[in-house]
Image (spheres, rainbow, N blue to C red):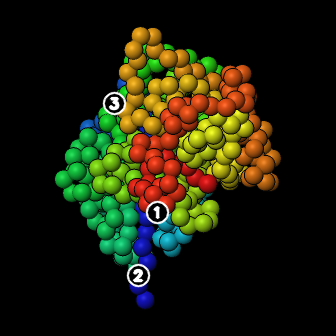
Amino acid sequence: MARRAAAIFDLDRTLIASSSAPVFQRHLAAAGLDNVPEIPFADAFLRFYDQFGESWVMMQPAKLGARTAKGWSIAQVAEGADGAAAEIADTLLQPFAPQVFDEHREAGRLLVLATTSPEPWVAPLAEKLGFDAVVATKWRAADGVYTGELDGPFVWGRAKADAIARWAAANDISLERSYAYSDSYFDASLLASVGNPVAVNPDPRLQAVAVLRGWPVRHLDKLDGVIKIAGREIQDWARPFMREELQPFARIQIDGVDNIPADGPAILVFNHRSYFDPAVMGLISARSGRAVRSLGKKEVFDVPVIGRLLKGIGGVRVDRGTGSDEPLEAAAAALRGGEILMMAPEGTIPRGPAFFDPELKGRWGAARLAAMTRAPVIPVGLWGTEHVWPRRARFPRLPVGSRPLVTATVGGPVPLEYDDPDADTRRIMTAIVDLLPDEARERRTPTEEELALTYPPGYTGDPAAEANRRPGTDTSAS
């Protein structure tokens, strides 16, 4: 029988964004321990730690922490640790961490919390998160109080890797089949001891080690694959340059951005009129101050360089060929992690007379995602983008004279009932239409020239020829 595997997680700057010490200290004081030490220059310490991670100097006070606990009541420490566990699990845990836990549980791996923090502090947190084991610094106790001495090694650096090795041997765990997650260069030996190391929010030195050794890098506050540079993702760095006035192709008027939630999940849905639509939606995203994820066909993500770039900025790979809800699972995972997802329910730019139909027809992907996650659906009505980059053109048009006007209006959440995806899709499309100007609701007969602009370059009108054409890049989840 094959030996079991484990998934081993560090705590600070891995499962939570910063140090857990201030949380524990606050709750220990609230439990009645009156000699809980305060960290000197705590704000500066935390800013340095958040940016650069831990250091040997920084860990020396922690190594002496057991002395501070001399005389502390075991019961009071347990009470404070319970309160800290609730706060960390409910408000501080990185948004994508629970999904990673579930993936390992489903694969039959044991979950292990491996941290330098004292075991009396972190054991209640491990229990609350459903972990199977804790490897941490132990304190000696007698007669209901802690003695101020360590009960074993200070579990940090190489000592943490050794402690995990001893735990694995005692529990018949294969480290070669196991995973380990940490942010710290001082956990490099632990990461190297398992078959599947993952550098999570790595400090600068661990980032370098990960690059040299080919270890994957993750950020559990973001969708898997999102690239961060100096702690910020690409969309964050680009935001100052995403401004309407810097855009040369059109005059862009955006209204209603305040309807986009400041935090938590949401599904932004827009009507698809032009290849210029994503640029306008990018401006809306920048104005909202939030990164927005978009769906992309698996064929595009499978292109080596382009696919990695799309994943790096938060694209969600979708395979629409399964005929089930499976294509939506990656998008639902993003929403459950608190992300904003952008999609065009029409799936592609309508062609011919359908482009001028006042009644928009959509696929049910957004409605299904809303039912799966209860994320609010936020409609966006776009108008005029076809004057910038019509489907017929291979590139956007540089304006001659005045720039065309493009409007984008963001509405409030669409009231949905979640029991009928087709009915909810109609509600979504109606909400988008309600945001468009009056001319969008007028039926008219387009000219031949207008009709021609709605077809892709090289369109012949021959159905057989069109069936053999190379697929485009318009995407949706339906």
Mark 3: which secondary structure?
Answer: helix
Residue 20 position within the rendered picture, expressed as x and y whole percent measured from the top left: 47, 41
Where residue 426 appears, as percent x and y from the top left, is: 75, 44
Disc 2 crowd, CA 10 A, few/some/many (<14, 14-19, 20+): few
Please say if 91 is above or below 460.
above
Point out the tag, 3 or 2, that comes first from the N-terminus: 2
CA distance for labels 2 and 1: 16 Å
Q: Residue at x 62, y 31 (%)?
A: 446
Amino acid residing under circle 1: Val
What percent of the width, then of the height, locates residue 466?
47, 55
Crowding at mark 1 (Cα within 10 Å: few <14, some 14-19, many 20+)? many
**Between marks 3 and 2 in the image, the one whose residue lies nearer the viewer:** 2
Which disc number belongs to residue 112? 1
Residue sitting farthest toward the top = 401
Name the residue type under label 2. Arg
User: Which residue of the protein is positioned furthest toward the bottom in this rendering?
Assistant: 1
Q: Residue beneath label 3, please?
A: 48
Q: Secondary structure at mark 2?
A: loop
In the rendered image, the quadrant that contains the C terminus is: bottom right
**Residue under circle 2?**
3
Residue at 50% across, 71% down: 107
Amino acid on which disc 3 is placed: Phe
Q: State how far apart marks 1 and 3 are (Cα).
A: 27 Å
Q: Residues within 10 Å of mark 3 (few under 14, many from 20)?
A: few
